Image (tube, rainbow, N blue to C red):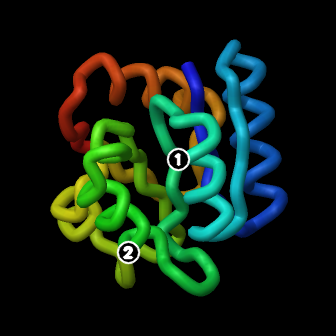
Amino acid sequence: MKILVVEDQAIESKLAVHVLSAAGHDVSSAEAAEQALAAIKESHPTVILMDLSLPGTDGLTLVRRLKADPATRDIHIVAVTSYPEKFSREEALEAGCDAYLGKPLSTRTLPATLVEVVKNAGPLDR
């Protein structure tokens, strides 16, 4: 499965990329919205692990943009945040995210969660 990790914190990005790559997935990463858009055009990932608190354009704005575009609306998106008071589960799901995870991410369950999102092709309540 092709996965794009959109995360501005280097240590968290490296951890997610490592865990997902070790699980056998084709993983790339981006640090900000514009970089993510370029990566999406290039590789059209199956699923995006999207940090909602990004520099410049935040993750929810990027999600809404992706879901409004016919070329990218079919990509599954899993929202990730350290700030549930700023980015709520309800807001993320309304924007088009398929699941919502709080940080710190569980390295034990992350690969299975992303596979479940793609298999279910509908929002997960996590």
Amino acid tagged 1: Leu
Q: Which badge, 1 or 2, comes first in the chain's sequence?
A: 1
For residue 61, which numbered disc appears in the image?
2
| 109 over 38 or under it: above or below | above
- Residue extending farthest to the top is 24
The 10 Å Cα crowd at callout 1, few under 14, some 14 to 19, many 20 or more, is: many
The x, y position of residue 87, in whole percent, is 36, 75
Residue drawn at 56 percent across, 46 percent down: 41
Residue drawn at 74 percent across, 52 percent down: 13
Label 1 to label 2: alpha-carbon separation: 15 Å
| 63 over 1 or under it: above or below | below
Q: Could you say which is closer to the camera, residue 43 or residue 113? A: 43
**CB of mark 1 within 8 Å of CB of mark 2?**
no
The x, y position of residue 96, in whole percent, is 24, 54
| 55 over 102 or under it: above or below | below
Provide the secondary structure element on which disc 2 rests.
Answer: helix
Residue drawn at 66 percent across, 20 percent down: 25
Amino acid tagged 2: Thr
Q: Is residue 71 left or right of residue 45?
A: left
How many numbered marks appear? 2
